[in-house]
Image (spheres, helix red, strand yellow):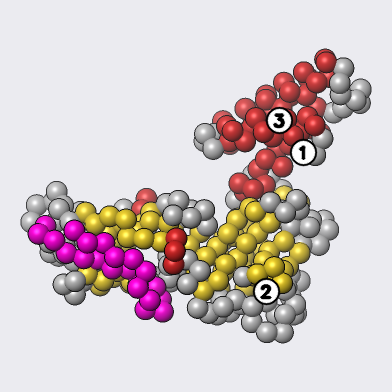
Amino acid sequence: MDAISKMSLVELSSHFNALKGADVCWPRIEKMISDSANSWLQSGKAPNDLSVMNVWWHTCFELLAPHQVQISALNYQDEYIEIKNLGPAIIDLSSWKITAGDKYQTFVFAKDTLIYPHETLRIETYPGSALSFDSKRPIWNNKGDKGALYDSDGALVSTWLYGDAAHEHVEVSLVNFDGLEAKKEGDEFVEVANLSHSVIDISLWQIRGDKGQRFEFPVGALIKPQDVVRVYTNQTHPSTGGHNFESQRALWSNDGGKATLYDNQNACISEYQW
């Protein structure tokens, strides 16, 4: 990346997370990069044939790639991993790589591999598909593993954890045992937090209470990086995962109790007592 793009990228990155929606994001990016490029042209430090538009596109793609392309699925039973381009730019994946658990299990994207906005690419474990680790044996550990996506410079873009690889990064962070809803207290909830910067798959994990309460997360349940999910007694809130016990009565005693989180292998992960 040239000096102008690097300078623009540093400035833009500090603002990117605050930009909401393409109608705000793209005009602001265009103005900031154009202003930066024009400043360099006027200073006489940039080549005379510098194209502001080329700098704009190049820097936009460099900026957006780590925010756009994410691991979207990992299936250790059927042995594949998927990445998705959340849009809006076409991203060149040349020399990007995916590691499965360790550096010796690596897939490298071929030159000129493109991923289009909202497109999903599946990388299989076994030979026979266009995108494959070309391995003759399983590479994803059934008990737990980590999938990681790196860009062409070796910078970590996205990670996905499941099973025992996720244990130290998940905890029961809160039990709201005293609901405001009269009698049935459907607004009680148990909150589970992801302390990491990875997506964590909690398919078939369970919350169990000391009075026989039990909830099992469905297949495909995820916790986003640095985020939480909640399991309500009898309310549905999509913003925190949409999970609930569907109980017609209050579940958590105001006088004290315990909620415990177990993974899909029945290993105890975290306890919360009050």
Crowding near pointer 3: few (<14 within 10 Å), some, many (20+)? many
Q: CA distance from mark 3 to mark 2?
A: 37 Å
Residue occupied by mark 1: 58
Q: Residue furthest bottom?
A: 136
For image coordinates 67% across by 47% down, the residue present is 65
Residue at left 72%, top 54%? 154
Look at the image and say whether residue 167 sits in the magenta stretch.
no
Q: Position of residue 66 (x, y in %)?
A: 64, 48
Residue 54 x, y percent position in the rendering = 81, 33
**Is disc 3 placed on a helix, strand or loop?**
helix
User: What range of the chain is rendered magenta?
Assistant: 254-274
Q: Which residue is mark 3?
A: 8
Q: Which residue is mark 2?
A: 124
User: Amino acid under label 2?
Assistant: Glu
Residue 217 visible in the picture:
no
123 horizontally vs 214: left or right = right
